[in-house]
Amino acid sequence: MAEPKTVQGYIDERPTWSDGTAITSTPMTGMQWRIFGLASAGKLFEGMVVFMTGVALPLISVEFGLATADKGLVTAASLAGILVGASALGGLADHFGRKRMFIAEMVIFTCFLIALTLAPNFTTLVICLFGAGVALGCDYPTAHMVISESIPTSVRGRLVVSAFAFQAVGALTGTVIGFAVLYESPDVTAWRWMYAVAIVPAILVTIGRLYITESPHWLLHEGRTDEAEQATLRLLKRSPAYPTNVSLRHMIDEATTSASSYAALFNKKNRRATILASVPWFLSDLGTYGIGIFTPTILAAIIGKKSDGTALASTIHNDLLGIKGSALMDVLFVIGILVAIVLVDRVGRIKLQTIGFIGCAVGLLLAALSIRPDGQHTMILLFAGFMLFYFMTNLGPNSMTYLIAGEVFPTEVRGRGAGFAASFAKVGAVMTAFLFPILLKEIGTSTLLYLLVVAFILGAIVTVTFRIETTRVSLENLGAAPDNDVEPQATPR
């Protein structure tokens, strides 16, 4: 009979050499890598769909004859869906389980994606983008939880951020796909093929998610100890087999089957975590999605020019011009997340998030200063500013806010907490996605950039004020610290 341990105790256990020396890291199993890959796919789809909308928007506008406000609805629809889905569906993972919602969200996403490519009118288009967004919103807390509740503490930060990195990969992929489709088929309906590319991969990911384990942490919390033991064995299946038996029965008195409500996020125990998880993410999304979606539009507006020919030819010409510039920025987006992966468990979440907020503010300030009062621009300063912003946002706030939101809450409210934080953040994303086309026209690009500089400075201030460092802290200790415990103690390494 195996010596009783906690779930995380089994997951974190390290083999030893014959002389008793422990190896430096806990080896990952095939099931753990499968969970990581399937969770990463959800972030890739989000990056593709959300950021591809910026590429598709000029073509959609021509096909459906959109006004400025209509363009805002198109770009805001998927983000509004994420806002709703993160809490409405993501929170259900605390009740129905991580795996069920992990599968359900991808089924919903695939159905709306297929309908999107066939949308006959503007209203249907917006509904389909919203529906796809609802599914992607559910993925915010569930993808984080299926990874973090299944992997060793020592690599949790790197792997969760690595999965989130696929949002950046998706953004770059979406931009490249948009360019390739539009280049090969310079037609007003090319946007439909852009979205259609993701349908088959989405179906394959849905099938793959049927064959993962349920979270042993969640099962144990629900009082389903026997199932939790079996799930732990399946999660840690190795050759040769180890462990050969799992005993979690001693935890039954500590587990509770009662589900907490959203009100629990604002009690004394969780209030600090809720503020840290929600407010900086909101401020980050004001710029990350606004700039990310509209980089092709902003660059085309600043450096674009009319081509000879029809209005459609001019639209396609400037869209391709903006896409090229945006693709360059997306490369920095990917590089930023790669650096974050290397540093997250060394430097820590709070330091990276703070440095990233400040770096983003500096980058947007440079971009704003590149636009002179006479309407001309300093090209080097413009691109330097945007490149710095794209690098720093994924080094810091865009990736760290996602990571922190899924770590600072206890198991019983982890789904609700991470879902609420994602929904609150997407309020900022929806605001900028809807208002950006209007504000670009009404107050100009430079003024809008200055406002975002202020938002990112506030993000750094809130991060430092409400900081809770979760680096190398065991998942079973996260959220257990008292309200004034700023930096919980890490478990022995």
Image (tube, grey):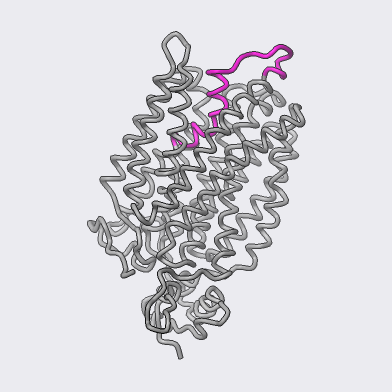
Tell me: 272 left or right of 287: left
Q: Residue at x 38, y 83 (%)?
A: 19
Residue 293, placed above or below residue 135: above
Q: Residue furthest left?
A: 484
Whether residue 88 is visible:
no
Residue 467, placed above or below residue 306: below
Residue 346 picture location, percent across and down: 35, 55
Residue 433, placed above or below residue 342: above
412 or 408, nearer to the observer? 408
Tell me: 84 left or right of 62: left
264 or 43, nearer to the observer? 43
Q: Residue furthest bottom?
A: 1
Q: Residue furthest top?
A: 374
Q: How many marks?
A: 0
Q: Residue at x 62, y 45 (%)?
A: 131
Whether residue 457 is visible:
yes
Task: Inspect the magenta stretch and tell me whether residue 192 lies in it.
Answer: no
Q: Quadrant of the C terminus?
A: bottom left
- Quarter-wise, where is residue 366 in the image? top left
Magenta region = 286-314
Residue 199 picture location, percent across and down: 71, 48
328 or 364, nearer to the observer? 328
Task: Inspect the magenta stretch and tell me whether residue 295 lies in it.
Answer: yes
Tell me: 10 left or right of 349: right
Residue 427 picture location, percent across and down: 46, 39
Residue 448, placed above or below residue 207: above
Assign the magenta stretch its main secondary structure.
Answer: helix
